[in-house]
Image: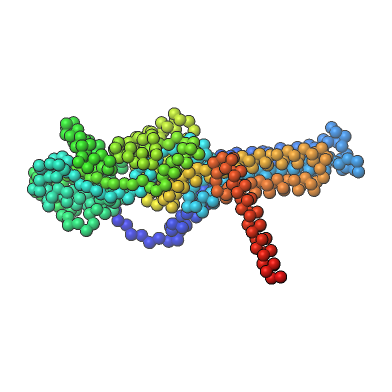
């Protein structure tokens, strides 16, 4: 652990970082926009060539006059009409919906690292959630400290007072708090908070190593070692599986696992184990689901039609308790960071489409990076998770997940509509213009009108997203009803006011 004091300039401020991420997001073009940019270059050359062909070859092939007369429009006139009608202005502004959506999401506290993320989100068919800090509040509370192995005279979760100083529970809490001081992990924060205000022995950390996904290892002073009073103590804190794996004897490892499973406090709590001088103490933590999580999961399942799962490093009982509370049926528990990574890769490979990973900790970073879209609740997220994520939810609100997915699907749909609208306007303006049915001024009007329609369609990305065409129609009807209702009420108020005046 390193403590650093810095003074931030404006360039390093959070607000400036948000502005930079928004600008970078608008510069990272989605696939369709890159294709339109490349297509537009060649398309413009073809339009110019066709316009010249109509102007120069029209008199030879179709007997049109070159300059035109009172009976027939000339080939130059027709060529200019084609050039105006077929110019790719409407196509060029078709991706405007991406920039509009990114700005709309940013106003809601959701930052995207590029418009391409919207395409990726709309194509995903599965979503995986981390548990602690994502589906739950992450504000763990230490409910009990239980000696389970290696303590003298352990009975019913309590040890002989002569085993530790001043007792096993206090010594374990002092050691764990010293090791977790300055941590950002929810369990570490809970341990430190639980130690505040308690009369505990003084423990100093001499060396320290963090093992992501496993735990923390340290050497300590201030803890009595049975064999040698002056020897530095070695301590480890982490998951039950990690602590039990430190014991070379298979029998001893199984004893620790069995003691954790048969704990007097039951299997429902989140558990962490501490090993000091071959003495193992179990910490029990309580974590509650976030409010509104069930509604979020229901929306993702029923409206977004996503395959939902939970990936967690916690043990089976705790994982299933939270999964049941938040209405998730598929649960994968006791996962290390590499296990989460492999699971994400397997689901993406076998399920087709793509996978969204939602997390917040350093343990989630590999899975976030490997997922089609990594989504992070950024308020309490680790720096590593934020660095690899594609979507940052700044307000730490999981309700932003379905909103973001719905907005992505709305945006990709609007872009496709805009492209279709642009091509339709080009065809219906260019063909009659070449055939001589449209005057040049009307061709210009149709062309500019088509571009305007595409822009108006694109800014619909500012509207609240919907999940289906039926929802779109219902939203439009409600908007019209509210508009005419407000107009009617205003007119009625003015009429009453005029009547009273008279």
The figure's colour scheme reads rainbow
Residue in the foreground of this view, choosing between 380 and 474: 474
Name the spot of residue 227 as percent of width and height, x first. Answer: 8, 44
Asked whether, in this view, residue 7 is left or right of residue 209, the answer is right
Name the spot of residue 196 as percent of width and height, x first. Answer: 23, 57
Is residue 369 visible in the rendered image? The answer is no
Instruction: Report the residue that reaches farthest toward the bottom.
Output: 501
Is residue 393 visible in the rendered image? The answer is yes
At 71% from the left and 70% from the top, the residue drawn is: 502
Identify whether 442 is placed above or below 49: below
Identify whether 261 is placed above or below 208: above
Residue in the foreground of this view, choosing between 161 and 451: 161
Instruction: Report the residue that reaches farthest toward the top.
Output: 350
Asked whether, in this view, residue 36 is left or right of residue 182, the answer is right
Residue in the foreground of this view, choosing between 453 and 59: 453
Count of marks, rendered view: 0
At 14% from the left and 48% from the top, the residue drawn is: 168
At 34% from the left and 44% from the top, the residue drawn is: 132
Asked whether, in this view, residue 144 is left or right of residue 118, the answer is left
Name the spot of residue 281 as percent of width and height, x first. Answer: 19, 43
At 59% from the left and 46% from the top, the residue drawn is: 475
Instruction: Report the residue that reaches farthest toward the right.
Output: 70
Name the spot of residue 3 as percent of width and height, x first. Answer: 30, 56
Residue in the foreground of this view, choosing between 378 and 14: 378
Q: In which quarter of the image is residue 199?
A: bottom left
């Amino acid at each position: 652990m390193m403590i650093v004091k810095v003074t931030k300039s404006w360039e390093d401020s959070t607000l400036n970082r948000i502005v930079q991420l928004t600008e970078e997001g608008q510069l990272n073009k989605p696939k369709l926009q890159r294709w339109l940019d490349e297509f537009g270059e060649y398309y413009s050359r073809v339009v110019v060539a066709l316009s010249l062909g109509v102007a120069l070859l029209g008199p030879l092939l179709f007997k049109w006059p070159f300059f035109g007369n009172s009976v027939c429009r000339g080939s130059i006139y027709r060529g200019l009409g084609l050039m105006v009608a077929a110019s790719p202005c409407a196509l060029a502004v078709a991706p405007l919906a991406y920039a509009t959506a990114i700005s709309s999401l940013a106003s809601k506290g959701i930052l995207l690292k590029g418009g391409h993320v919207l395409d990726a989100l709309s194509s995903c068919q599965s979503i995986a959630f981390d548990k602690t800090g994502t589906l739950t509040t992450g504000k763990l509370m230490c409910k009990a400290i239980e000696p389970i192995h290696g303590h003298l005279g352990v009975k019913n979760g309590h040890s002989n007072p002569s085993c530790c100083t001043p007792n096993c529970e206090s010594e374990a809490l002092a050691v764990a708090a010293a090791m977790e001081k300055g941590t950002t992990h929810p369990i570490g924060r809970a341990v430190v908070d639980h130690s505040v205000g308690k009369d505990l022995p003084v423990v100093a950390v001499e060396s320290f190593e963090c093992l992501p996904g496993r735990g923390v290892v340290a050497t300590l002073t201030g803890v009595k070692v049975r064999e040698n009073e002056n020897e530095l103590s070695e301590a480890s804190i982490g998951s039950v599986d990690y602590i039990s794996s430190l014991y070379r004897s298979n029998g001893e490892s199984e004893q620790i696992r069995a003691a954790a499973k048969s704990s007097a406090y039951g299997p429902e709590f989140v558990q962490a184990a501490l090993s000091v001088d071959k003495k193992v103490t179990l910490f029990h933590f309580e974590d509650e689901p976030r409010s509104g999580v069930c509604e979020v999961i229901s929306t993702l399942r029923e409206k977004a039609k996503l395959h939902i799962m939970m990936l967690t490093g916690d043990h089976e009982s705790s994982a299933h308790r939270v999964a049941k509370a938040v209405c998730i049926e598929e649960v994968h528990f006791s996962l290390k960071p590499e296990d989460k990574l492999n699971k994400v890769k397997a689901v993406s490979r076998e399920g087709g489409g793509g996978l969204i990973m939602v997390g917040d900790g350093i343990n989630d970073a590999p899975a976030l990076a490997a997922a089609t879209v990594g989504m992070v609740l950024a308020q309490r997220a680790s720096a590593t998770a934020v660095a690899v994520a594609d979507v940052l939810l700044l307000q730490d609100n999981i309700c932003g997940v379905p909103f973001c997915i719905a907005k992505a699907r709305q945006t990709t749909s609007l872009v496709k509509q805009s492209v279709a609208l642009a091509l339709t306007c080009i065809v219906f303006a260019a063909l009659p213009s070449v055939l001589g049915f449209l005057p040049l001024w009307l061709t210009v009007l149709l062309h500019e009108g088509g571009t305007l329609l595409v822009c108006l369609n694109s800014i619909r990305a500012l509207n609240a997203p919907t999940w289906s065409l039926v929802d779109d129609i219902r939203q439009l009807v409600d908007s019209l009803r509210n508009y005419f209702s407000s107009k009617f009420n205003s007119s009625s108020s003015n009429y009453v006011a005029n009547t009273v005046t008279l």
